[in-house]
């Protein structure tokens, strides 16, 4: 029996994807239902029906899963930021661990030794960075997050994943926008000024950065905004970032400081880190320390004389390694000039002389003579060219930090085909509540 749109069915949820959609079978047909948990028995209203699958909406929970919890966020699941606020954290960790194993098996054809996933101390309030789109709907100011697969802003200033201070600062900025009639960006007409409110917090020092992303360089009444923030002692830096382009990228290339020097300082793995708006910095400091210590432990196991740190960002992991191993030289490679500048400043700030940083593409940077190459690529993983280059150069040891199990599995299969042996894999939950999971592993030739 085929399903049709607007059918109502009873469905047992067998599993959940990393997007938060439960999967059940109806007469053998896969039915995807958002915000459901493994073990739920539900009533589902079919909103899309295809020959090979269907999509439903949960209209009634007939019998809840033991893993189901009460949703504690009024914006969930509409805002699209979280995937698992309806499930226990233990169930979320198991799901992510299973997803890592599945990616290696399905994509890489590999049966890996998987270490227990490292969870967060707290699944809430961990984000040290948040970017809130700003707009108007029927004249009403909206500040929050884009709904999944859209640019419709779901108003949400009290995100459960962000520090509580962010909500108060957003309120102050909103009051300033309304009081002084500051224009906000309209994507349809490509007019208006303020596009995003971008906040960063250094958890170790408590310092906060406020950055207004604007399509226009000359925002009026910024002095009044600074005045309204004078009681927020944690705010050390206020900037305007200029982004006039018709693009999905949040930030432009130019920043104008209004207060402070444009940076805040955090401490990660014992290393002081200066962070600018354009710097890459892990959004979960506590989990990043666990991830980086695991990577550093693996990289130091072979006692290399020289280490290359590809996709080094602001140099955090390379400087951490260099500080812990003063007899080993570290060369960081990063394609973003501002990040390279931050990395060099961070090395000097920490008195680390055995780390240098070069602005180059990982594909063309000098890699000969390194005993270990550490890699922390974006979600798309290594480029095919870089994989081929590493397989040709064959550095003795490769440590791979990944934010996407699927691309890690793909790259791992290529390295193994070239003669590398892969060690065990340690998953780390850097982003509780969301579908993302990090991993670290290493390869020896």
Image (tube, helix red, strand yellow):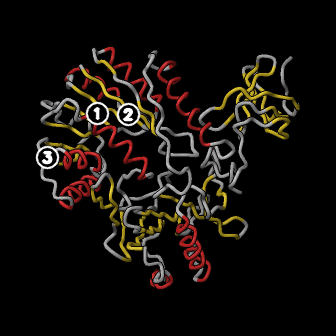
Query: Residue 16 appears at what percent x and percent y?
Result: 66, 32
The image quadrant of residue 235 is bottom left
Q: Quadrant of the N terminus?
A: top right
Q: Secondary structure at mark 2?
A: strand
Q: Secondary structure at mark 3?
A: loop
Label 1, on which residue? 298
Query: Residue 71 appears at what percent x and percent y?
Result: 71, 50
Q: At 50% from the left edge and 58% from the top edge, which residue is drawn?
A: 130
Query: Residue 101 appears at what percent x and percent y?
Result: 50, 24
Q: In screen coordinates, is 33 left or right of 16?
A: right
Residue in front for this viewpoint, 422 or 198 = 422
Label 2, on which residue? 440
- CA–CA distance in space, label 2 to label 3: 23 Å
Query: Residue 300 appears at what percent x and percent y?
Result: 22, 35
Sequence-first tag of 1 and 3: 1
Q: Residues within 10 Å of mark 3 (few under 14, many from 20)?
A: few
Q: Secondary structure at mark 1?
A: helix
Disc 1, disc 2: CB below 8 Å? Answer: yes
Q: At 28% from the left edge and 33% from the top edge, which residue is drawn?
A: 298
Q: At 20% from the left edge and 26% from the top edge, which residue is drawn?
A: 395
Of labels 2 and 3, the one closer to you? 3
Q: Quadrant of the C terminus?
A: top left
Q: Which mark is residue 340?
A: none
The image quadrant of residue 3 is top right
The image quadrant of residue 42 is top right
Label 3, on which residue? 326
- Is 36 drawn above or below residue 173 in the view shown? above
Residue in front for this viewpoint, 151 or 168 = 168
Q: In screen coordinates, is 245 left or right of 31?
A: left
Q: Residues within 10 Å of mark 1 (few under 14, many from 20)?
A: many
Sequence-first tag of 2 and 3: 3
């Amino acid at each position: 029996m085929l399903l049709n749109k607007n059918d109502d069915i009873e469905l047992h949820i067998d599993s959940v994807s990393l997007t938060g959609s439960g999967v059940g079978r109806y007469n053998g047909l896969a039915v995807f239902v958002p915000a459901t948990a493994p073990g739920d028995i539900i009533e589902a209203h079919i909103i899309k029906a295809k020959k090979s699958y269907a999509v439903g909406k949960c209209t009634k929970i007939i019998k809840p899963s033991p893993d189901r919890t009460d949703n504690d966020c009024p914006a969930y699941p509409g805002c699209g930021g979280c995937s698992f606020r309806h499930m226990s954290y233990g169930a979320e960790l198991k799901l992510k661990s299973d997803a890592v194993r599945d990616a290696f098996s399905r994509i890489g054809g590999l049966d890996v030794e998987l270490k227990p996933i490292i969870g967060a101390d707290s699944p809430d309030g961990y984000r040290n960075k948040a970017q809130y789109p700003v707009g108007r709907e029927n004249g009403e100011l909206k500040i929050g997050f884009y709904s999944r697969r859209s640019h419709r802003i779901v108003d949400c200033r009290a995100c459960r994943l962000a520090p509580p201070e962010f909500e108060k600062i957003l309120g102050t900025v909103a009051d300033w926008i309304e009081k002084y009639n500051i224009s906000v960006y309209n994507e349809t007409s490509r007019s208006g000024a303020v596009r995003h409110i971008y906040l960063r917090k250094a958890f170790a020092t408590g310092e906060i950065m406020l950055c207004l992303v604007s399509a226009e360089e000359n925002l009026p009444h910024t002095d009044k905004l600074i005045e309204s923030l004078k009681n927020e002692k944690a705010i050390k830096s206020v900037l305007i970032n200029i982004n006039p382009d018709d693009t999905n990228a949040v930030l432009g290339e130019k920043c104008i400081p209004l207060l402070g020097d444009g940076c805040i300082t955090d401490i990660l793995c014992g290393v002081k880190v200066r962070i600018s708006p354009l710097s890459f910095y892990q959004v979960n400091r506590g989990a990043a320390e666990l991830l980086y210590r695991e990577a550093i432990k693996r990289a130091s196991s072979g006692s290399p004389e020289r280490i290359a740190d590809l996709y080094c960002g602001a140099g955090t992991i390379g400087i951490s390694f260099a500080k812990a191993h003063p007899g080993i030289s570290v060369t960081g490679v990063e394609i973003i000039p501002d990040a390279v500048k931050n990395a060099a400043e961070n090395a000097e700030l920490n008195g680390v002389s055995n780390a240098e940083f070069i602005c180059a593409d990982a594909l063309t940077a000098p890699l000969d003579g390194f005993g270990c190459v550490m890699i922390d690529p974006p979600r798309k993983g290594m480029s095919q060219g870089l994989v081929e280059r590493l397989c040709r150069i064959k550095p003795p040891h490769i440590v791979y930090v990944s934010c996407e199990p699927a691309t890690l599995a793909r790259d791992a299969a290529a390295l193994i085909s070239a003669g590398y042996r892969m060690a065990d894999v340690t998953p780390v939950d850097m982003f509780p509540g969301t579908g993302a999971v990090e991993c670290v592993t290493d390869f020896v030739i």
